[in-house]
Amino acid sequence: MTDHTISIPDNLYQKAQQVAQQQSLTVDEVIRARLALAFDLPLFDLPEVEKEELKAMAYLSDDTLWTIAREQMQPALQRRISELLARNQRGAISAAEYAELEALVERSDRLALRKSQAMKYLAERGYAVSPDDLNPADE
Protein backbone atom coordinates (compact mmCIF):
# COMPACT_ATOMS: atom_id res chain seq x y z
CA MET A 1 0.00 0.00 0.00
CA THR A 2 1.22 3.48 -0.84
CA ASP A 3 0.66 6.34 1.59
CA HIS A 4 -0.65 9.60 0.16
CA THR A 5 -1.72 12.75 1.92
CA ILE A 6 -4.75 14.63 0.69
CA SER A 7 -6.62 17.62 2.06
CA ILE A 8 -10.34 17.21 2.68
CA PRO A 9 -12.86 19.70 4.03
CA ASP A 10 -13.45 19.63 7.78
CA ASN A 11 -17.11 18.67 7.34
CA LEU A 12 -16.15 15.53 5.37
CA TYR A 13 -13.60 14.57 7.99
CA GLN A 14 -16.23 15.03 10.71
CA LYS A 15 -18.65 12.80 8.82
CA ALA A 16 -15.91 10.18 8.47
CA GLN A 17 -15.27 10.42 12.21
CA GLN A 18 -18.98 9.86 12.96
CA VAL A 19 -19.13 6.81 10.71
CA ALA A 20 -15.87 5.47 12.13
CA GLN A 21 -17.17 5.80 15.67
CA GLN A 22 -20.49 4.12 14.81
CA GLN A 23 -18.74 1.22 13.08
CA SER A 24 -15.76 0.91 15.47
CA LEU A 25 -13.30 1.65 12.66
CA THR A 26 -10.53 4.16 12.17
CA VAL A 27 -11.17 7.24 10.07
CA ASP A 28 -8.56 5.98 7.57
CA GLU A 29 -10.46 2.68 7.20
CA VAL A 30 -13.74 4.52 6.59
CA ILE A 31 -12.22 6.83 3.98
CA ARG A 32 -10.43 3.94 2.20
CA ALA A 33 -13.66 1.90 2.12
CA ARG A 34 -15.68 4.82 0.75
CA LEU A 35 -13.09 5.56 -1.92
CA ALA A 36 -12.96 1.91 -2.96
CA LEU A 37 -16.74 1.79 -3.17
CA ALA A 38 -16.87 4.99 -5.20
CA PHE A 39 -14.33 3.71 -7.72
CA ASP A 40 -15.77 0.20 -7.93
CA LEU A 41 -19.38 1.16 -8.55
CA PRO A 42 -20.33 1.38 -12.20
CA LEU A 43 -21.89 4.65 -13.17
CA PHE A 44 -25.63 4.47 -13.36
CA ASP A 45 -26.92 3.87 -16.81
CA LEU A 46 -29.21 6.86 -16.41
CA PRO A 47 -29.83 9.98 -18.42
CA GLU A 48 -27.53 12.80 -17.32
CA VAL A 49 -30.49 14.81 -15.97
CA GLU A 50 -31.41 11.98 -13.57
CA LYS A 51 -27.79 11.57 -12.46
CA GLU A 52 -27.63 15.27 -11.66
CA GLU A 53 -30.91 15.13 -9.73
CA LEU A 54 -29.57 12.31 -7.57
CA LYS A 55 -26.35 14.20 -6.90
CA ALA A 56 -28.29 17.36 -6.03
CA MET A 57 -30.07 15.47 -3.25
CA ALA A 58 -26.86 15.90 -1.22
CA TYR A 59 -27.93 19.51 -0.63
CA LEU A 60 -31.40 18.70 0.70
CA SER A 61 -32.27 19.06 4.36
CA ASP A 62 -32.41 16.04 6.63
CA ASP A 63 -36.20 16.40 6.90
CA THR A 64 -36.58 16.40 3.12
CA LEU A 65 -34.34 13.33 2.80
CA TRP A 66 -36.42 11.50 5.42
CA THR A 67 -39.58 12.41 3.48
CA ILE A 68 -38.08 10.96 0.29
CA ALA A 69 -36.82 7.85 2.10
CA ARG A 70 -40.35 7.22 3.42
CA GLU A 71 -42.09 7.87 0.10
CA GLN A 72 -44.35 5.06 -1.13
CA MET A 73 -45.93 4.36 -4.48
CA GLN A 74 -49.66 5.03 -4.39
CA PRO A 75 -51.66 1.91 -3.42
CA ALA A 76 -53.71 2.09 -6.64
CA LEU A 77 -50.50 1.97 -8.71
CA GLN A 78 -49.14 -0.89 -6.60
CA ARG A 79 -52.35 -2.85 -7.22
CA ARG A 80 -52.18 -2.11 -10.94
CA ILE A 81 -48.59 -3.37 -11.15
CA SER A 82 -49.63 -6.56 -9.33
CA GLU A 83 -52.56 -7.07 -11.71
CA LEU A 84 -50.40 -6.55 -14.78
CA LEU A 85 -47.64 -8.81 -13.44
CA ALA A 86 -50.20 -11.56 -12.82
CA ARG A 87 -51.63 -11.16 -16.33
CA ASN A 88 -48.11 -11.22 -17.76
CA GLN A 89 -47.28 -14.45 -15.89
CA ARG A 90 -50.43 -16.05 -17.29
CA GLY A 91 -49.50 -14.88 -20.79
CA ALA A 92 -52.75 -12.92 -20.99
CA ILE A 93 -51.37 -9.41 -21.34
CA SER A 94 -51.97 -7.15 -24.32
CA ALA A 95 -49.26 -5.05 -25.94
CA ALA A 96 -50.77 -1.89 -24.43
CA GLU A 97 -50.89 -3.46 -20.97
CA TYR A 98 -47.29 -4.62 -21.34
CA ALA A 99 -46.21 -1.09 -22.23
CA GLU A 100 -48.13 0.19 -19.19
CA LEU A 101 -46.41 -2.41 -17.01
CA GLU A 102 -42.99 -1.39 -18.30
CA ALA A 103 -43.75 2.28 -17.56
CA LEU A 104 -44.98 1.48 -14.04
CA VAL A 105 -41.96 -0.70 -13.29
CA GLU A 106 -39.67 2.07 -14.50
CA ARG A 107 -41.52 4.54 -12.29
CA SER A 108 -41.16 2.17 -9.34
CA ASP A 109 -37.44 1.73 -10.06
CA ARG A 110 -36.90 5.52 -10.12
CA LEU A 111 -38.70 5.81 -6.78
CA ALA A 112 -36.53 3.06 -5.30
CA LEU A 113 -33.41 4.79 -6.60
CA ARG A 114 -34.44 8.14 -5.06
CA LYS A 115 -35.26 6.43 -1.78
CA SER A 116 -31.89 4.64 -1.79
CA GLN A 117 -30.04 7.86 -2.51
CA ALA A 118 -31.87 9.63 0.33
CA MET A 119 -30.99 6.79 2.72
CA LYS A 120 -27.37 6.94 1.58
CA TYR A 121 -27.13 10.65 2.33
CA LEU A 122 -28.85 10.19 5.69
CA ALA A 123 -26.39 7.45 6.62
CA GLU A 124 -23.49 9.66 5.56
CA ARG A 125 -24.85 12.35 7.89
CA GLY A 126 -24.64 9.92 10.77
CA TYR A 127 -28.21 8.62 10.93
CA ALA A 128 -28.89 4.94 11.47
CA VAL A 129 -31.59 4.11 8.94
CA SER A 130 -33.66 1.04 9.86
CA PRO A 131 -36.73 -0.45 8.15
CA ASP A 132 -38.92 0.91 10.98
CA ASP A 133 -37.64 4.42 10.21
CA LEU A 134 -38.92 4.10 6.66
CA ASN A 135 -42.59 3.76 7.50
CA PRO A 136 -44.54 6.75 6.27
CA ALA A 137 -44.64 9.45 8.95
CA ASP A 138 -48.44 9.27 9.26
CA GLU A 139 -48.44 5.57 10.23
Image: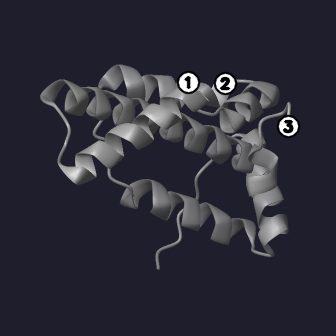
Q: Secondary structure at mark 2?
A: helix
- Which of discs 2 and 3 lies nearer the camera? The answer is 3
Count how many numbered circles sit on residues in the image: 3
Compared with residue 54, is residue 35 higher up or lower down, i.e. above or below?
A: below
Contact between labelled residues 3 and 2, with CB atoms less than 8 Å apart: no
Q: Is residue 94 left or right of residue 46?
A: left
Which kind of residue does numbered mark 2 sit on?
Tyr
Q: Earlier in the sequence, mark 2 or mark 3?
A: 2
Q: Is residue 130 visible?
A: no
Spatial separation of the CA atoms under disc 1 and disc 3: 28 Å
Quadrant hosting residue 83: top left
In the rendered image, residue 65, in percent from the top left (x then y), is placed at 71, 31
Q: Secondary structure at mark 1?
A: helix
Query: N-terminal of the two: label 1 or label 3?
Result: 1
Judging by the rendered image, the residue that carries numbered circle 3 is 139
Residue at the location (75% across, 45% down)?
134
* Cβ–Cβ under 8 Å for marks 2 and 1: yes
Secondary structure, mark 3, is loop
Near-viewer residue (136 or 15): 136
Distance Cα–Cα, label 2 vs label 1: 6 Å
User: How packed is label 1: few (under 14 Cα within 10 Å), some, or many (20 or more)?
Assistant: few
Give, as a three-letter code, the residue at label 3: Glu
Q: In the image, is 52 to the left or to the right of 94? A: right
Numbered tag placed on residue 22 in the rendering: none
Q: Quadrant of residue 85?
A: top left
Tell me: 56 left or right of 8.
left
Label 1 amino acid?
Ala
Query: Which residue corresponds to mark 2?
Result: 59
Mark 3 Cα within 10 Å, few/some/many (few <14, many 20+)?
A: few
Q: Which residue is mark 1?
A: 56
Q: Position of residue 77 (x, y in %)?
A: 49, 28
